[in-house]
């Protein structure tokens, strides 16, 4: 058993506790959260800073970790995609070694669970042996209607390889998935007990332009790839509004990035019965496009908001605290409690693991992080995270 006392404890499901004490058993199970000193105070480790649950990273691509520092910044999404396609295939030993290093990095940065996108089986062994909880999204993409069935079946086959680990099949992005493939995934989601969906959404303006007018850089991407997309006609709506009807109402759906999502899109979603959650990965957005989502539009709209790191192809580190720092700097009105809720409990809720993680409730195994170097409860470049258990 261990007890930690800090300036504040953030249980997340309840108000912060000044001079709070968290006690865990040898397996990390929360025994108590209180401000009352025990009879023997010498058993309590006194710490400066705040204690919160372990972080939940709801968007990562561990299998792309070998692309760290390979892709130039600010090239825009289409160039980023071209570069990933060019460099992603590498020696399998190099891919595995980089993935293991990334997994360790997340552990050290206080992350306890990851929603991870996979296009291959490269990370199955790593995930089976990791100290972190993983949910794998087996990602499918093809913009050609005639390939939909083949691509979907390949996805199901990869899903079988990941089982019995937690996993689901998911579409990549509006610009890379044909209506036919969307429909196959929807049918599967509608008839399967549990299949979490996670989709890259409105990562750049050209995605909306492509859907509305069939203009912009995605045409060049398909030309570059030698893929004939004459079947695709401009839609009356932008990408998000075009694909929402193609998504299931039976499963939880994470919209990732949302860099160019506007208020009309948010209102559009509210008119549907889809179970939408939002995930922000601001450091990857800055890396690729040099902009961040209009986060303030999403506040107080009744949605569950989570955080992700994206991959090391588009981020210098896999660190949820760094994502919180960027949001704090871009949106100074955001409070620490709100950011911590996005970083912990909300991610756990989306992944369906909040019975065990995401908050400091008695009986859970959420992990404990110590955050130091806050300035009047604001995250600054001097703020650090240390894993306590
Ligand atoms: Zn991604």
Image (cartoon, helix red, strand yellow):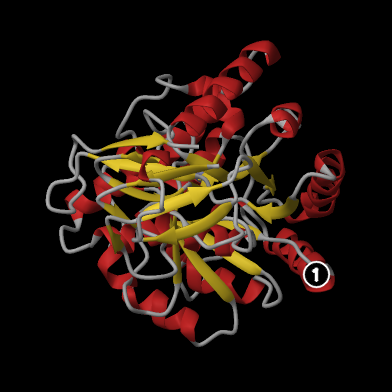
Q: Is residue 49 visible?
A: yes
Which residue is found at the position 37% from the left and 65% from the top? Answer: 261
Q: Quadrant of the N terminus?
A: top right
Q: Looking at this rendering, what residue extends furthest in the bottom direction?
A: 271
Figure check: 361 above or below 312: below
Tell which of 107 and 29 is nearer to you: 29
Tell which of 179 and 225 is nearer to you: 179
Which residue is found at the position 74% from the left and 61% from the top? Answer: 195
Tell which of 345 and 150 is nearer to you: 345
* Residue 133 percent across, percent down from the top left: 64, 43
Left or right, 314 with respect to 297, comes to: right
Left or right, 308 with respect to 300, comes to: right
* Residue 227 percent across, percent down from the top left: 64, 41
Q: Report which quarter residue 80 is drawn in.
A: top left
Which residue is found at the position 36% from the left and 78% from the top? Answer: 264
Question: For the residue carrying disc 1, how many other residues have a C-alpha within 10 Å: few (<14), some (14-19), or many (20+)?
Answer: some
Badge 1 is on which residue? 187
* Residue 53 percent across, percent down from the top left: 45, 51
């Amino acid at each position: 058993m261990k007890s930690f006392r800090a300036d504040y404890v953030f249980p997340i499901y309840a108000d912060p506790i000044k001079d709070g004490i968290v006690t865990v058993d040898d397996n990390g199970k929360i025994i108590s959260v209180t401000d009352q000193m025990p009879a023997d105070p010498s058993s309590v480790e006194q710490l400066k800073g705040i204690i919160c649950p372990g972080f939940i990273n709801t968007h990562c691509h561990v299998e792309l970790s070998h692309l760290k520092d390979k892709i130039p910044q600010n090239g825009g999404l289409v160039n980023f995609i071209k570069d990933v396609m060019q460099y992603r295939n590498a020696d399998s030993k190099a891919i595995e070694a980089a993935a293991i290093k990334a997994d360790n990095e997340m552990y050290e940065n206080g992350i306890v669970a990851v929603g991870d996108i996979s296009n291959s089986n490269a990370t199955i062994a790593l995930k089976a042996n990791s100290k972190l909880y993983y949910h794998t999204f087996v990602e499918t993409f093809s913009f050609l209607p005639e390939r939909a069935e083949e691509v979907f079946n390949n996805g199901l086959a990869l899903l079988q390889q990941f089982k019995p680990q937690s996993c689901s099949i998911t579409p990549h992005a509006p610009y890379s998935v044909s209506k036919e493939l969307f429909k196959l995934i929807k049918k599967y989601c509608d008839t399967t007990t549990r299949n979490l969906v996670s989709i890259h959404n409105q990562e750049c303006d050209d995605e909306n332009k492509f859907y509305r007018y069939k203009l912009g850089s995605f045409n060049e991407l398909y030309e570059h790839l030698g893929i004939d997309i004459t079947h695709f006609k401009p839609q009356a709506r932008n990408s998000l509004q075009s694909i929402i009807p193609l998504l299931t109402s039976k499963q939880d759906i994470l919209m990732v990035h949302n860099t160019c999502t506007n208020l009309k899109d948010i209102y559009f979603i509210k008119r549907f019965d889809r179970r939408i959650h939002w995930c922000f990965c601001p450091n990857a957005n800055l890396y690729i496009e040099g902009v961040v989502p209009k986060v303030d539009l999403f506040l107080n709209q009744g949605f569950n908001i989570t955080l992700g790191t994206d991959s090391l192809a588009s981020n210098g580190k896999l660190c949820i605290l760094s994502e919180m720092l960027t949001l704090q700097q871009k949106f100074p009105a955001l409070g620490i409690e709100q950011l911590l809720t996005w970083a912990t409990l909300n991610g756990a809720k989306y992944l369906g693991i909040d019975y065990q993680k995401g908050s400091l409730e008695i009986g859970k195994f959420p992990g404990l992080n110590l955050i130091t170097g806050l300035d009047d409860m604001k995250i600054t470049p001097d703020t650090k995270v240390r894993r306590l258990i």
